[in-house]
Image: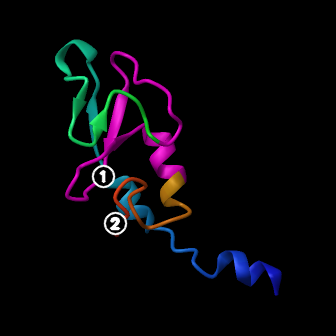
Amino acid sequence: MLMDVFTEDFHPVLDAAVAGLEKRVFHPTAEPRCDGDNIRACTICLNDYEDGVEIAITPCPGRHEFHPRCIVNWLRQSNTCPLCRHAL
């Protein structure tokens, strides 16, 4: 079936893994412009982080940061980090 073609590689993470994402509050004055792979914008939606917004951190070695809503939506479709493809 056509649906099988599109869902063959569908591997969402468990809800417990999504709920267990580490979070922190973003403050631009305390942040370097770029710290390794972590920048001052969500690489899923491409919007800048605003002062005081909560950021979710992936448990991959790069500890990549995203808007919580963006990474949760991503992880409901894929079990890998959007940046480094590390299995979560």
Q: Which residue is mark 2?
A: 88
Taking the spot 40% from the left edge, 18% from the top edge, the residue there is 50
Q: Is residue 3 left or right of residue 8?
A: right
Q: Please report the bounds of the magenta region as a residue range.
A: 44-73
Disc 1 target residue:
58
22, 33: nearer the viewer: 33
Check the picture and name the quadrant holding the N terminus: bottom right
Query: Picture quarter containing residue 82?
Result: bottom left
Task: Report the disc number at residue 85.
Answer: none
**CA–CA distance between discs 2 and 1?**
8 Å
20 up-or-down from 43: above or below:
below
| Residue toward you, 52 or 78 | 78
Q: Is residue 80 magenta?
A: no
Q: Position of residue 27 (x, y in %)?
A: 26, 18
Residue 42 vertical placement versus 11 (above, below): above
Picture coordinates of residue 79, whole percent (x, y): 44, 67
The number of callouts visible is 2
Residue drawn at (50%, 41%) of the image: 69
Residue 39 place in picture, x, y as percent: 31, 32
SS for tag 2? Answer: loop
Task: Report the residue at 40% width, 24% height from top.
Answer: 49
Identity of the residue drawn at 70% across and 75% down: 6
Q: Amino acid at mark 2?
A: Leu
Q: Are marks 2 and 1 in contact (CB under 8 Å)?
A: yes
Q: Counting residues from the N terminus, which is met first, the one under dot 2 or under dot 1?
A: 1
